[in-house]
Image: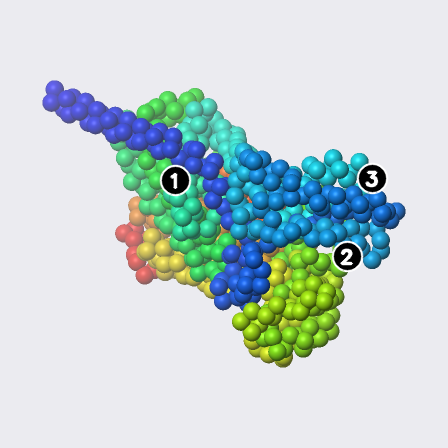
Amino acid sequence: MKEEKSRAGGRWKWRAAIAAVLIGWLVLGALGGPTVGKLSEVQENDNANFLPKQAESTLVANESAKFVDSKALPYFVLIVRDSGITPQDVANANAFLAKVPTMELGGGKTIGDYLAAPAKTVIPSEDKKALLLTVEIDGERADEVVKSGETVLFAVADTMRTNIKQDLTPTGLTVYVTGPGGVFADFVVAFSGIDGILLGVALAVVFIILLIVYRSPILPIAVLLTAVFGLALAALVVYPLAKHGVLELNGQSQGILFILVVGAATDYSLLLVSRYKEELHDYESKYQAMLVAWRAAIEPIAASAATVILGLLCLLLSQLGSTKGLGPVGAIGIAGALIAAMTFLPAILLAFGRRIFWPSIPRLDHVHASDQVGGRKLWGRVSGLVGRRPRRVWVVSMLALLACAAFLPTFKASGISQEDLFLDEVESVTGQQELAKHFDAGAGTPVQILTPAAQADQVVQTASKVDGVGTASASPAPGVPPKVVDGKVLVQATLTVPADSPEATKVVQHLRTELDHVSPDILVGGNTAINLDVLDASKRDLRVIIPAILALIFVVLTLLLRSLVAAVLLVVANVLSFGATVGVSALVFNHVFKFPGADPNIPLYAFVFLVALGIDYSIFLMTRVREESKEQGTRPGILVGLAVTGGVITSAGVVLAATFSALAVLPILFLVQIAFMVAFGVLLDTTIVRSLLVPSLAYDVGPRVWWPSTLKNQD
């Protein structure tokens, strides 16, 4: 009787704890859900703000502010008539330009309220086929909201385009709103709805895969709720930190945050659910089964999360604010996924009991996964192959990976022009292309050269002789003397190549070299110089951050597995997997998709995600192998561990690959490339590295794989 009362009391304690956890998460979700949608309000997408303070272009940007009243963001209105501009076209253009300040943005505001300077005069092209109008708004106010969540940045472009359709297009003119302002506005459109579209696609894909994996209509919903609650928790932390400038959030890092949380939470959930289902075959009590499963799963899941978090935090070593900002944003996301998977998910599983697995409800039958080794099931056959021919398996696997990695040097990551950033045709990009046909390609976005006043004339002469520079002048307007501030003059040089292109960065690099001969005090800045400094900072980050990540992962693996040999084996295997992924990506990007190149940050981002996330699957495998090896010996433990974890880890890999693939729904080259590289790399990790290379190599090494520690049962 006392025993029954004790059991009843224990059940009530469990039920009270479950109710408390579920209510707590419901409250947190109600608070965090709306915050997820507000993250876009605290984004910062200006490259100049992401550069280190000591970068040459940053120094010029700070000093050049003294030469103008405000930080201007230019919009170019390009007017084209292929048959030739007529006097009436010029009159219409001037009328449009005069109307610009009065154009309404909404909320009682007009474009004139945000102009940095009076609208400039209409400039005709030399071929008499185009006119160029420049409208400059105050860049420091571009993020202000004017109506329905629209920022000034977007509203100015949208309003001018609406008026163009009314006033200029009916006259037979072709008109584009382009320039930096137009491009940024089109980025807003590309990222619009990122909260709903990206998250919706990711969750839908995961739901379908989980239905196939679990063959249960209830369990996938529980796993997806875990991911959603994990994201809500992360948003509650990220939003205030970004709002108060503690960390920097941009469109890319926000999209990656969504994917990381959904992917990681699902992976952790798969591992816990798999172990819980396994224990239900041995324990009648669902509470006892969960306790055993939770204790067994917490170590590999926590170690996995710690590896990813530490890897992401290594991005704080970056010189680029955008990369540096992704580190803590992603780390917070992973922490949210971990907490949700280890608290909310166990509570919802216990609330439903065995019924959550319906119709495949696990029974108390003491059927063990170790019985699969050498059996007819897929992972039983794979483990049997590893046990029969370990050396042949790892040698062939390694050679295949090395063959793929041989193409790594062909991966192009030296930057791309703005017209290549979008995969869809957008007005600003088409306008830039047309602008280059009728004006100097760098028109409107000049290179800024800060020089001592005494050397201004020499700087103009030197700059004009550099190949790729069209014109250079220290005068703000014809007949106006140069403005001198603190003994310095700002020289502006127009390039003959598009200012945002890789060719332009080479021109600026050459320009800096030539001007260094004139004086080391001369600084070269502007948008093109910013791109060059971003490229240089990205190269430096690769040299610094990759070794730091590898060192941290090695330490975590050594502590987790109590082995130096196993840690080295896993790190080398995953680095080889990364090399193979980049090599295959180079082949696909260059010859299949024919992409023009890649952002210089792509290799670093891919490394962080592939190595930090890819090591997860080896952690899940080797922690189970170590557990089984204590009872059965190293080599049998490897085969049992592979057979037991094969299905769940492969499912986790497929889910993560599919989740990252959701990034491809956004028509931005950077995100599509990241989506392909991570998805392919994760599948490579789960099918080749974790399934064949790591277990066969560990099997061949034998008990020495645990050196310097030893296990009770060695074979």
Q: Position of residue 134 (x, y in %)?
A: 69, 51
How much space separates mark 2 and mark 1, taking CA atoms?
Answer: 48 Å
Q: In which quadrant of the rendered view does residue 466 lie?
A: bottom right
Question: Residue at the top extreme?
Answer: 1
- Residue 416: in sight, yes or no? yes
Few, some or many C-alpha atoms within 10 Å of disc 3 (few <14, some 14-19, many ≥20)?
few
Q: Which circle's residue, 2 or 3, is located before the other in the chain? A: 3
Amino acid beneath label 1: Leu
How much space separates mark 3 and mark 1, taking CA atoms?
Answer: 51 Å
Amino acid beneath label 3: Gly
- Against 362, residue 293 (above or below) is below
Residue at x 40%, y 25% (from the top left corner) = 357
Residue at x 42%, y 33% (from the top left corner) = 33
Q: In which quadrant of the rendered view does residue 472 lie?
A: bottom right
Left or right, 613 with reference to 8: right
User: Which element type, helix, strand or loop, lies under badge 3?
Assistant: loop
Q: Position of residue 515 (x, y in %)?
A: 63, 75
Q: Which circle's residue, 2 or 1, is located before the other in the chain? A: 1
Few, some or many C-alpha atoms within 10 Å of disc 1 (few <14, some 14-19, many ≥20)?
many
User: Which element type, helix, strand or loop, lies under badge 2?
Assistant: loop
| Residue 151 vs residue 102, the one in the foreground | 102
Which color scheme is applied?
rainbow
Q: Which residue is mark 2?
A: 439
Check the picture and name the quadrant holding the N terminus: top left
- Disc on res. 236: 1
Question: Residue at the left extreme?
Answer: 2
Q: Position of residue 493 (x, y in %)?
A: 68, 66
User: Which element type, helix, strand or loop, lies under badge 1?
Assistant: helix
- The mark tally for this picture is 3
Q: Which residue is mark 3?
A: 172
Residue at x 61%, y 68% (from the top left corner) = 483
